[in-house]
Image (tube, rainbow, N blue to C red):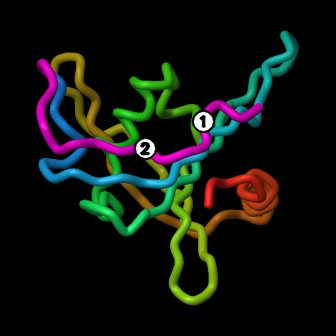
Amino acid sequence: MEIFNGIYSWDGKRHGSREPIAWFPGSYKLQIVNIGEDDGNITSLKQYLCVYSETGKGHSISAHPEKFAKHVCKDFSLDLERIIWVEKIRTGDVRYEVVVFTRGSKLGNDMFYKVHKRPPTQSELKTIEEAVKYLCA
């Protein structure tokens, strides 16, 4: 089940107490798909697939995707740790990188994550390719 398929953008300004994703405006193509339904007997560790890619408009978050991921989770009521995060990169051939967030330190209620990027496994690649057939152009 698709939750979102479109352009996710930010204006680079603070809104209330919430800091922006980046202090410069930007936008990304974003697709969020529910891939793991809990059936009562089995609980999926990763319930969602989130595929994002640059639009070429505005600030890039590729090097530091943590704030982007946290904003997406807040806006769509998702748990950051139950999502397979994937960045779609266009460098000649389409390439995918799985972005892994590992808990780091905590300050008050704010959790900070270490970010690691890796190639997808074969099963992840199959799931990604099935989902991106419908990714916004």
Circles 2 and 1: CB distance less than 8 Å?
yes
Q: Is residue 116 above or below residue 78?
A: below
Residues rendered magenta in the picture: 1-17
Q: Nearer the viewer, residue 63 or 105?
A: 63
Q: Residue furthest top?
A: 40
Q: Label 2 belongs to which residue?
A: 8
**Residue 135 sits above or below residue 45 on the image:** below
Image quadrant where one finds the N terminus: top right
Along the viewing direction, whichever of 77 and 136 lies nearer the viewer: 136
Residue 63 screen position, x and y as percent: 30, 64
Separation of residues labelled 2 and 1 (CA atoms): 9 Å
In which quarter of the view is residue 49 placed? top right
* Identity, as a three-letter code, of the amino acid under mark 2: Tyr
- The residue type indicated by label 1 comes to Phe
> Split into 4 quadrants, where in the image is the C terminus?
bottom right
Dot 2 alpha-carbon crowd within 10 angstroms: few under 14, some 14 to 19, many 20 or more = some
Which residue is nearer to you in this view: 116 or 35?
Answer: 35
Q: Which residue is mark 1?
A: 4
